[in-house]
Structures are given as structure tokens and as C-alpha cells.
């Protein structure tokens, strides 16, 4: 069963329109015993969607994806296997949240595999290299049983974190992933508290059927091994409209500090037609992940930089720009603490290994080759 918001989103309509369909007898609603609102049968929604496309029946082989990994609550944010991500971010380690998503009965080895020296300089290229080498050095990479997939995901997450920056003096092979990243992303004595990095990893670990997650599930549907499937996810996440969006928000804050918030926002709007770090297709009343992460990030910023972030948000609100999203919180954390501009994408990539692996395992329980869109030829 779908909630009211989920049903409206699948149909691509607003909630009042959805209830108009009910009043006209096109849909049947059911009382939701857990909260205020209604529930709708998935088959009814999909049937109406098929009848409504262009006023004609359209036959496709597009799959309807039922998932038990993450539910998106429009007010509370992602819910991982029944647990609020915003609560887990304050109470659980990234590793524990990953095991929760994977439904792994017992934790495994999160140590870094021996891959040799990395020849590349850009962070994203180093991460791609590490993922490829993880697969190349796994003698049984085609083992698709859930414990084997979880083992592969642990190796991948550890390797991606390891190539982010130089290993700190004394090593950190036994440290949590968040602590390893915090040490590599900051220089000298300016290390960011691992708790803030851990919260970012937990909040970004999964977001239902995001674009990169769909890439992983498509790869799983043709039974690609977990390394190739997660490489598809990493390639998709790299885009500036997905995992790279926080770097654009980082640059917005840099310009706001240099030239003032009004000029920065105006210049970005003139160039891109939108403000990076603001608005979300799911969260109309604000991204709950933003509030949770900014609350941890703000105490780490200088007073001047906290003021800049607040001024940017206030100016956007005064001009009816949609509310801030998690990309702005990631940008504020990285910009305000001296981490590199691409830190948001780096944290996003390591975190999403957890969600990708969970969806990969779930997709393996479905019939293969179920993703096939129908093209409408046009001249």
C-alpha cells in the first residue's frame, strides 16, 4: 500500500488531484491506521498511471519496484528498515547502519584491502580506481550470496575511504570509517570531529530509488557482480546534479564570503537559473537531513562563517526560494571546517555504498532483466 504522498508522486499529480480521482470513482482510498491520511493500492495507482499517459494505454516492461530498504517520509526524512535516519545519525555508527541496511546478522571485517600505490590524483578518480582494484583482487567476485555481497561492500567502503587522502601518522586501520575520513579530509590539528562525519555518512547512506541506486539495481538485474554494479552507481553519482551538487553549494558559500550573499546568489541564479543546495523533489517542507546535519556543523564554524550561511538562507527565503537541502549542509560542513570542495561528493560516495549494496541484494531476489523501457518513436 502507498501513502497519499507516495501515490501522488507516482502519478505525478498534487494531493488534491489525487483525491479528485477518488471522488470521481477512479481510485479507492483506504484509511491509514498508523497516521492521518489514506492508503492506496499499488496496483490501482499503476493501472491509473498506465491509462492516463497521454490519454492512451501504453504498454511497457518498466518494473514496479517494491523495496524494504528505505521509505521516504515527507516530514521525517529517510527511514532505514523502520529506523529514522536522523535518529540513527546521532546514535549509531556508519558501520552499524550499513549492517542494518544489509540485514547482516553479524558484523564483518572493515579493514582496507591491499591494492598497491594509487597512481591518480583526483579524489573521484582514485575512488574509481580503488573500486575496480577491489573487484580485480577478489578471487570469488561472482559470489552473489548476501554474506559475500556484504563482505564486498565492506571492502569497497574501506578502500574508498582509504584513498581519499594520505594515511595519518601511526595508521588508522582499526578506526571506524568516519574517523578515517575525518583524518584524511583535514590537515594538521584541524581535524573535524568524527561524529559530524559519521552523521553525514549515516544521513547519506540511502535515499530510496535515487538515480545512482537505480543504476545499481539495473546492473543487478542483469546479474553483474557487486563490484561492477557499485561502479555503475559511482559513475552516476559523480554527476553535478546528483553527488556533485554539494560542490556547487560549496562554491556558492565561497563567493558569498568573498563578494557578499546578494551578489553570490544573483550571479549563480543568472548563470544556472537555480540555487544549488536549495529545493528537493520529495521534501516540500524542508529536507530533514539538512536540519540534522547543520545542527552538528554550525558549532564547528567560525562566527563569521555561521553568519554567512544564515544570511544566504535568509536571503533565499525572502525571495521564496525552496528550502535548503542536504547539499547545503554538506557544503557548510566542508567549507566551514577547511575540508576540500569535493568533500560532499566524497562523503556521499562512501556513504551510499551501504544503500547500494542493500538494493543490490534486494534486486537479486527479483526476476532478472525486468528493466526495459518502451520507446515511442518520433520523427
Image (cartoon, rainbow, N blue to C red):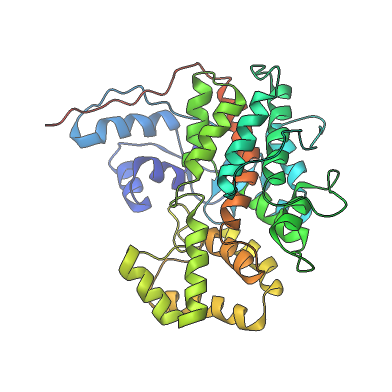
Residue 378: image quadrant is top left
Front position in the image: 204 or 123: 123
Residue 269 is situated, as x and y percent measured from the top left of the image, at 35, 69
Residue occupying image coordinates x 72% and y 43%: 97
Residue occupying image coordinates x 77% and y 37%: 112
Front position in the image: 316 or 44: 316
Residue 68 in sight from this viewpoint = no
Give the position of the C terminus as an image quadrant.
Answer: top left
Q: Is residue 333 above or below residue 377?
A: below
Residue occupying image coordinates x 37% and y 31%: 46
Residue 288: image quadrant is bottom right
Which residue, as the protein is rendered here, is positioned at the far right? 170
Residue 26: image quadrant is top left
Give left or right: position of 120 versus 114: left
Residue 102 is situated, as x and y percent measured from the top left of the image, at 69, 32
Residue 124 is situated, as x and y percent measured from the top left of the image, at 56, 46
Residue 307 is situated, as x and y percent measured from the top left of the image, at 58, 82
Amino acid at each position: 500500500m502507498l501513502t497519499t504522498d507516495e501515490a501522488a508522486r507516482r502519478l505525478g499529480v498534487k494531493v488534491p488531484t489525487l483525491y479528485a480521482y477518488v471522488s470521481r470513482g477512479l481510485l479507492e482510498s483506504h484509511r491509514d491506521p498508523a497516521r492521518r491520511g489514506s492508503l492506496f493500492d499499488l496496483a490501482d495507482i499503476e493501472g491509473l498511471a498506465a491509462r492516463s499517459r497521454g490519454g492512451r494505454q501504453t504498454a511497457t516492461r518498466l518494473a514496479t519496484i517494491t523495496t524494504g530498504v528505505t521509505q521516504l517520509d515527507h516530514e521525517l526524512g529517510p527511514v532505514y528498515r523502520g529506523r529514522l535516519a536522523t535518529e540513527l545519525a546521532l546514535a549509531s555508527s556508519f558501520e552499524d547502519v550499513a549492517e542494518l541496511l544489509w540485514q547482516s546478522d553479524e558484523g564483518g571485517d572493515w579493514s582496507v584491502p591491499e591494492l598497491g600505490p594509487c597512481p591518480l590524483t583526483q579524489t573521484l578518480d582514485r575512488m574509481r580506481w580503488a573500486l575496480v582494484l577491489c573487484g580485480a583482487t577478489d578471487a570469488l567476485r561472482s559470489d552473489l550470496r548476501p554474506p559475500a555481497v556484504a563482505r564486498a561492500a565492506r571492502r569497497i567502503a574501506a578502500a574508498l575511504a582509504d584513498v581519499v587522502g594520505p594515511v595519518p601518522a601511526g595508521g588508522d586501520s582499526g578506526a571506524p570509517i568516519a574517523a578515517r575520513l575525518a583524518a584524511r579530509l583535514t590537515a594538521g590539528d584541524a581535524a573535524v570531529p568524527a561524529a559530524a562525519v559519521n552523521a553525514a555518512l549515516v544521513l547519506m547512506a540511502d535515499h530510496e530509488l535515487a538515480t545512482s541506486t537505480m543504476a545499481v539495481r539495473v546492473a543487478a538485474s542483469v546479474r553483474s557482480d557487486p563490484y561492477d554494479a557499485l561502479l555503475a552507481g559511482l559513475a552516476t553519482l559523480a554527476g553535478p546534479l546528483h553527488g556533485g551538487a554539494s560542490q556547487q553549494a560549496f562554491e556558492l558559500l565561497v563567493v558569498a564570503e568573498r563578494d557578499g550573499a546578494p551578489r553570490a546568489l544573483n550571479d549563480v541564479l543568472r548563470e544556472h537559473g537555480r540555487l544549488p543546495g536549495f529545493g528537493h523533489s520529495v521534501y516540500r517542507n524542508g529536507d530533514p537531513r539538512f536540519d540534522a546535519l547543520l545542527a552538528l556543523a554550525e558549532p564547528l564554524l567560525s562566527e563569521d562563517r555561521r553568519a554567512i550561511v544564515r544570511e544566504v538562507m535568509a536571503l533565499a527565503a525572502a525571495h521564496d526560494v525552496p528550502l535548503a537541502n542536504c547539499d547545503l549542509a554538506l557544503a557548510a560542513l566542508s567549507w566551514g571546517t577547511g575540508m576540500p570542495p569535493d568533500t560532499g561528493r566524497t562523503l556521499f560516495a562512501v556513504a551510499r555504498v551501504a544503500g547500494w549494496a542493500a538494493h543490490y541484494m534486494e534486486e537479486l531476489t527479483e526476476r532478472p532483466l525486468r528493466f526495459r523501457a518502451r520507446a515511442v518513436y518520433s520523427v
